[in-house]
Image (cartoon, coloured by chain):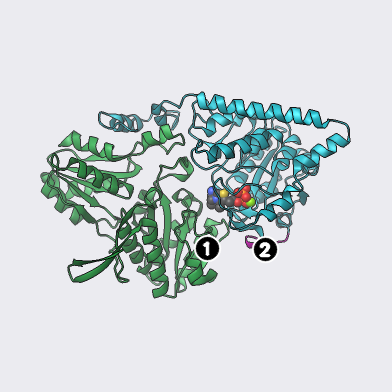
Chain colours: A green, B cyan
Amino acid sequence: MSTETSSGSGPAQTEEMTFREAIRLALREEMERDEDVFMMGEDVGKFGGVFEVTGDLVEDFGETRVRDTPISEAGFMGAAVGAAATGTRPVVEIMFADFIGVCSEQIINQMAKNRYMFGGKTEMPVTIRTTEGGGMGAASQHSGTLHTWFAHFPGVLAVAPGSPASAKGLLKSAIRSNDPVIVFENKMIYEQKGEVPLDEDFTIPIGQASVEREGEDVTVVATQRMVGESLELAEQLDGQTSVEVIDLQSLYPLDTDTLVESVKKTGRLVIADESPLSYGTHAEVATRVMENAFFSLDAPVQRVGVADVHIPFSPALEQEVLPDGSDVEAAINRIV
Amino acid sequence: MLTIRSFDTKAGDLFADGELPGFVHLYVGEEAVGVGACSALEENDYITSTHRGHGHCIAKGLDPNVMMAELYGKAGGYCNGKGGSMHIADVDAGMLGANGIVGAGPPLATGAALTSVLKGEDTVALAFFGDGAVAQGQVHEAINIAATWNLPAIFVVENNQYGEATPVEKQHNVQNLSETAEAYNIPGFTVDGMDITAVYEAVKEARKRAANGEGPTFIEAETYRYHGHFEGDQQPYRTKEDVDIWKDRDAIETFKGRLVEAGVITEDEFDEMKAEIDQQIDDAVVEAKEAPYPDPSEAYEDMYSATVPEISQFSSQMRADGGEDR
Ligand SMILES: Cc1ncc(C[n+]2csc(CCOP(=O)(O)OP(=O)(O)O)c2C)c(N)n1
Ligand SMILES: [Mg+2]
């Protein structure tokens, strides 16, 4: 079901699709656009990916460009770095972000540093796609939200889309970027639907946040699954509290201007992100706002996240630690 | 072997009924490897396991009732509900943990074998890992260290022919995985993993070598998983006929046949034993179902042995008024 919408420069075709489909569309478009783009990961080929994201891409592009790897994250991450340095554009899938430690040597000491160490004489167009987040009883080693590590680490860019449209736009930018980009996909929103631009040149610049809903009383800066949770809450509070919801989209670089502009209007800030609260993404957003809009703040900044524990297995425990709309509501109630 | 077959068959049924949360990887078909190997170990020896760990746990003597509670995420499970199927551990019993990271076990086994040498103990450490895990860099590193340091370790590859959906020949360039032992200059054998006696004999010999200070052994056991990689796996990568070829060589049936023939057990006695075990597993399920969930507040415990102010501060904030979670 395609619709015509007018936005800015002219009519743009959009279609409703899931987050998963939006990612697959971005992969397909970029593979078609540029022969240098190829994918590798565990069971991304014929099996279609453990979360069924790569789906049937192998049928269109073949096993050479959609490569099943042995279970050797360090090995194939290293191969991606070498391939990128010699002229290709690999897109690597790391099944769960929790496994990234297995190949972090290649990410931290090779991928992120080569360009700098070599005096700018090499490009490193690697895209890493990986999944984060709890909610499916997968326990601590398959549920973590680790993106702050990489948003923190110099030499890599980090994005974390909160809607199907941002998933497509950010992934396309990542693949086109000559710098390494890690795309953090929350596994609980693969089925989430939204309107996605079909334009093959639709991209979202890395480093740009998106105001998803305008409001007057409080700004909620959210990422990934928390974007949907916050939008739903904002709808519920309509009439009582006017909530502005921002999808942060890009963790590094961070769109300070959009955040500051919003808080200057609302005077209140809640940050909702599924990572652990200490030393986190929340702290960075808060600091950026306080550095730039301290005198516009009418109340202390509030953080919603995970209370510095791992994601436990039992549903009783997992639901306890995961943030949701009710936690955002509680945070709003503390300051509005 | 019957306890494992019964436990995991039940776990598969429970998962299909939506009773068990999370991921469940079953050991059905591979029982002779875990039981054959653990039978050749001494009680104080250590094992490391994998994501497909129920069989190793039972073979090492863990209590199926406590395991079942863990699968349900209940208080009283081996990890008090924090680990689940993939993380069952009982260090006191020598079981260093099922493991959600493919290939993460062998380095732990190398460490346990090092302890044995450092403390002058006579324990041996055995690592179970899959054919897929043989492709992991850290497995290579672990075996290399154990071989170079002449540690009392045994590396047992459960070659069940697949790593998830990818067949073994698409993951490795050698014919037999045991050939890789040559690279470490340690003995390597391929044995029939559907024959409990063959596995037992090989591990017994390996344990003797390890205890005599002759270093590690690499054993490949050829076996097969009857279920999918995980419960719910549609298995597009193989046919029912592929599975039947292996089922015809079922380890339990084979061993039973031998025992009956030798007059050790009668068919009736076998059936009785099986019924008893099935009953025990049914009881374990009832017990696990009735057990309480851990108190939600326990989610904030066990991170450190010391008290960390952040956790209590953040958790009380997250739990405060209105922050009600369901
Ligand atoms: C480091 C790592 N990579 C990938 C996975 C996902 N995964 C879980 S089990 C599995 C297959 C393992 O195959 P194998 O070692 O042969 O063991 P089997 O499942 O056949 O018992 C994979 C790829 C993981 N858990 N850890
Ligand atoms: Mg296998």
Q: How many labels does the image show?
A: 2
Q: Mark 2 points at which residue?
A: B173
Name the element at disc 1.
Answer: loop
Q: Does the magenta stretch include residue B251?
A: no
Badge 2: chain ID: B
Residue at x-position 19% and y-position 66%? A7
Q: As drawn, is B275 to the left or to the right of A30?
A: right
Ligand 1 is within 8 Å of the C-beta of the residue at disc 1:
no
Q: Where is residue A24 in the image (x, y as percent from the top left)?
A: 41, 63
Q: What element carries label 2?
A: loop
Write the residue at 41% across / 33% down: A317
- Mark 1 and mark 2: Cα distance apart in space: 20 Å
* Residue drawn at 66 percent across, 47 percent down: B226
Image location of residue A5, percent across then percent down: 21, 66
The answer to whether residue B141 shows anywhere in this view is no
Q: Residues within 10 Å of mark 1 (few under 14, many from 20)?
A: many
Task: Name which residue type carries label 1.
Answer: Gly
Between A277 and A123, which is closer to the camera in this rendering?
Answer: A277
A152 vs A86: above or below: above
